[in-house]
Amino acid sequence: MMRKTMFKKAVFAVAAAISLGLTVSARAQDEPHFSKQDWSFYGVFGTFDRPSLQRGFQVYKDVCSACHSLRLLSYRDLGGGGAIDGGIGLSTDEVKAIAASVQVTDGPNDQGDMFQRPGRPSDRFVSPFPNEQAARASNNGALPPDLSLIVEARPGGPDYVYGILTGFKDAPAGFTVNQGMYYNETFAGHQIAMPPPLSDGAVTYADKTQATVPQMAHDVVTFLTWAANPELESRHRIGVKVIIFLVILTGLLYAVKRKVWSDVH
Amino acid sequence: MASSAQSGAHGAQGAGVKRRDFLYLATGAAGAIGAAIAAWPFIYSMNPAADVLALSTVEVDLAPVQTGQRITVKWRSQPVFVAHRTEDEVKAADDVNLEELRDPQADSARVKKPEWLIMVGICTHLGCVPLGQKPSDPRGEWKGWFCPCHGSQYDTSGRIRKGPAPANLAIPQYAFLTDTTIRIG
Amino acid sequence: MSEPAWKNPAVKWIDERMPIFTVMRHSAIEYPTPKNLSYWWNFGSLSGFMLVLMIATGVVLAMQYTPNSELAFDSVERIMRDVNYGWLLRYVHMNGASFFFIAVYIHIFRGLYYGSYKTPRELLWWLGLVILILMMATAFMGYVLPWGQMSFWGATVITNLFSAIPLAGKHIVTWLWGGFAVDNPTLNRFFSLHYLLPFVIVAVVFLHLWALHTSKSNNPLGIDTKGPQDTIPFHPYYTVKDLFGLGVFLIVYLGVVFFVPNFFGEPDNFIPANPLSTPQHIVPEWYFLPYYAILRSIPDKLLGVIAMFSSIFVLFALPWLDFSRVRSARFRPVYKKVYWLLLIDVLVLGYVGANPPEGPILYVGRIATAYYFLHWLVIVPLIALFERPKPLPTSIGTPVLGAAAAASARTMEKA
C-alpha cells in the first residue's frame, strides 16, 4: 500500500518539477517589469477610495484625455445610479456641469449639417480624435489606446499601468532609444511611443493633495480600474452576502443529507 | 428493502419527527428563498437599462418655434407634437361643449401655458402618427390633426372629435424649466 | 406489477392520457440506485445543472447582445455597464462555461476510473462523448461572440484548420467563413448556432439519461447490483446528496463569479478584434488546451488536425480497447497506476497548450502526445490482456449476512 502512494507521489513530483522548470525558462528581457502596489479595491472586501477616484478623474480629464478616449463611459456614469451604483461620487449637478463643459457633435440638423452642442449626462465621453486615422496622424503613427478597459487588457492590470506611468526614466548608458520613442522601465522592450504624461505638479488637485507623479499615477489607475469595472463594489457586496447564504444553506443541506442517510450507513 | 430504507427515512415517530421536520422545513425554506433571489436578476435585467433610462427625458428649446408653428420632437422613441398655438386656435379649443366630446376634457386641463400645446403624436386608435404638423398637411374639420390611417380627427386641443379613436392625444409629463425651455419626461 | 394510484385528480387525469408523472416517479423518485455511490457520482447532476443555468443566462443575454462585428464588443460592454444585473448574468455565463467543463471532465474521469464505459454502458459512453463534442463546439462559438482579439484570432486559427482537408479544404473554409476571412457573416452564423446547439445538447442528454436508466448506474466497486438489498431509491437519498454537492459546487463557482470573475480569461480579449494585428500568443480557453497541444505537437498541418480530432474519437473505441471484465480501478492495480499517469499526461498537455511551442516545451508536448495515444492504443489493451485483477467483493453490501463480508470488502476497497 505504501509503495502505491509513494509511486503516485513520485509521479506527481516529477510532473511538478518539469512544470516548474519550464516556467523559469528565461524570456525575461521581453517581459514587462513592475512591482505590486496596494490598492483599496483589491480583495474580497475591496472598495474604491472615492477621493482618489475623483482626483484620478481630474488627471484623466486634464492630462490623458488630450490623446486617449474613454468611449465606453457616459458622463452620467460619474454620478452612478442606473445599473451600477456608486459612480465616482459626484452629484447630479456636478455631472451635468462636467458634461456641459464639453462640445459634442450632434445632427444632422434640418439643413443636413452636423453641429456642435454642449454635452449632456447621457452622452458618451468625447473622444480627442474623430477616428483612428486622425489619432495616428497626430501621434507619429502610434495609436493611443482607448482607456475604458486598459486595466483589464494588460497582464498585471493596475500594477502594470502604474508601472508604465511611473516608469519613465533616463535611458541607462549604452541603451539607444529610437527616434520618437521614450525610455520606460516597465514597458516590454523598454521603448514606448508615449511621451511621459505626468510630471510633478502637472495637475492642481481640487482637494489640495500634493500632485506628485506617484500620487497622480495611483489616482488615475484607481479611476481607470473603476472605469473598467464600475460594478466592482456592488459585486463584492452582493458576493459576500451570496457566499454567506450559500455556506449556511450548504450546511443545512449537509445536515439533511446525514439525517436522510442515517439508516443506510 | 427499498421500502424499509424509505420508511427508515420517514418512519420514526416521536420527538425525532419534530426536530427532523424542522430541519427539512428550514432547509426547504432557505432553498426556496435562494432560488427566488437567484431568479430575480434574470427577470429584472429585462427592465429598461441605464442608457435607455438616461434618454427618458428630453429638453426642448421653445424659442425658435414661431406662433402658429408646430414642431415634432423625439421622446422615448415616440413623436411629441409641440404646437405654438395662435389666439384663434386657443379660442377654438376653449369654445367647446364638453358634453359633445367623446373623451371630455377641458383645454385648460391639457396645457400649462395656453399658447403651448404639448402632446404625444400617436393616434389613440391604432398608433399611427397623425398629420397636421406642417401647414400643407390635412388638419381635418377642426383644424387640429388628421390621422390618415383610419380618419380620426383631432381639434386644436388634440381632442378626438370624429373617427374611430377612443381618446384624446396623450399629454406627456413635462415642466417649464424657463419661459422658453421645457423638459419632457 | 401495478402502479400505486395518483391521489390528486388532476394529476391522475393527465397521467391516464400521457403517463408523464408515472415516468417521473419511476426515473427520479423510485429509480433504484446503488447504495454505495461516492461523491464522484455528483458530477452528472452538476453538469445537468450547469446546462440549465447556461441556457437560462444565455437566453437572457441574447436579449441584449448584437451579433454584428461593428456592434458586438460594445453590446457586451453595454450589458456589463448599463443592463440591470448585466454584469452578473455575463460573469455567470462566462464562468459557467468553465465550471460546466470542470464538472464534465471530472464526470468523464470518474467514468474512466470505474469502468463506466464497459458493457452494457457502451452507448451511454458514446452519448456522453457526443455531448462533450457538442459542448466544445458551443463553447468555441460562444467565445467568438464578444469579438475581442482572442475571439477573432482563435476563430481564425481553428477555422483555418479545415483547410487541411485534402481537395475540398479551402472551399470548406470559405463556406464556414461566409467570406474570405473571419468577419461579420461568420459572427452571425456562430451566434445562430451557439443559440441552437445547447438545445441539441439537451436532446442528447435526454438520450444519455435514457441509456443510463436502461443499464442503471455503475458504482465504485464496479460490480452489478444483485437485488433491492444493494439499492436505495433515488429520492430522497440522492436528491438530497446531489443538492448538498450542488451547494458546495456553487460556493466555489459563485466565489469565482463575484471575486475573481476574470480568472479564466485572457487580457487580450478586452481589446476589440483587429484583423490587422495578431496577438503575440493565441491561446484558447483552458478547457481546450490539451487538444491544442496535441494539434501543435505534430509538424504536419493535416496530421496535426487528425491527431487532435483522434484524441476524442479514440475514446469511442474504449469499451473494446479496454476489454477487461473488471470495471473498477479499485481492483485493477496496474490500470490504476496507468490511470494516474494519463491524468498527469493530460495536465502536462494542458500546460504545453498554454505556452508557445518553442524550446523544451515542444519536446515535452510531443512526448505527452505520443504517450496519450500510446495509453489508449497499446497500454490499456495490454493491461486488459495481462493484468491480474484483485478478487472482487461478492456484493455491494448485505445488511443481514454482511458484517463479515462487508468488512472484508471494505479492507479491499482501502487497498
Image (tube, rainbow, N blue to C red):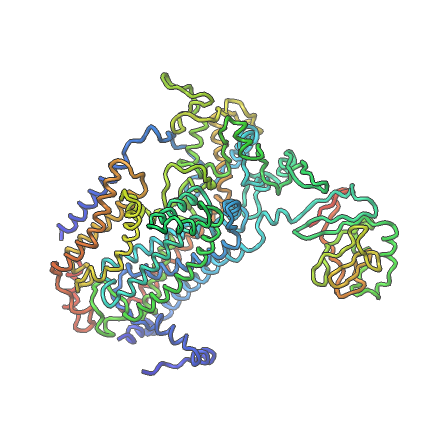
Answer left or right for C49 relative to C411: right
| Residue B157 x/y as whole percent | 81, 56
Assign the C terminus of chain C to one quadrant of the image.
Answer: bottom left
Can residue A223 be seen in the rendering of this structure?
no
Name which residue lies at 42% across and 51% down. C176
| Residue C26 x/y as whole percent | 35, 74
Residue at the bottom extreme of this rendering: C2
Name which residue lies at 29% across and 59% down. C39
Total numbered labels placed on residues in the image: 0
| Residue B17 x/y as whole percent | 36, 71
Q: Is residue C240 above or below residue C227?
A: above
Assign the N terminus of chain C to one quadrant of the image.
Answer: bottom left
Answer left or right for B81 relative to C34: right
Residue at the top extreme of this rendering: A173
Q: Is residue A260 above or below residue A239?
A: below
Please identify the quarter of the rendering in which residue A134 is found: top right
**Towards the viewer: C75 or A98:** C75
Q: Is residue C66 above or below residue C243?
A: above
Residue at the front extreme of this rendering: C167
**Towards the viewer: B20 or C368:** C368
Answer left or right for B155 relative to A90: right
**Towards the viewer: C213 or C252:** C213
| Residue C231 x/y as whole percent | 26, 71
Can residue C345 be seen in the rendering of this structure?
yes
Please identify the quarter of the rendering in which residue C11 is found: bottom left
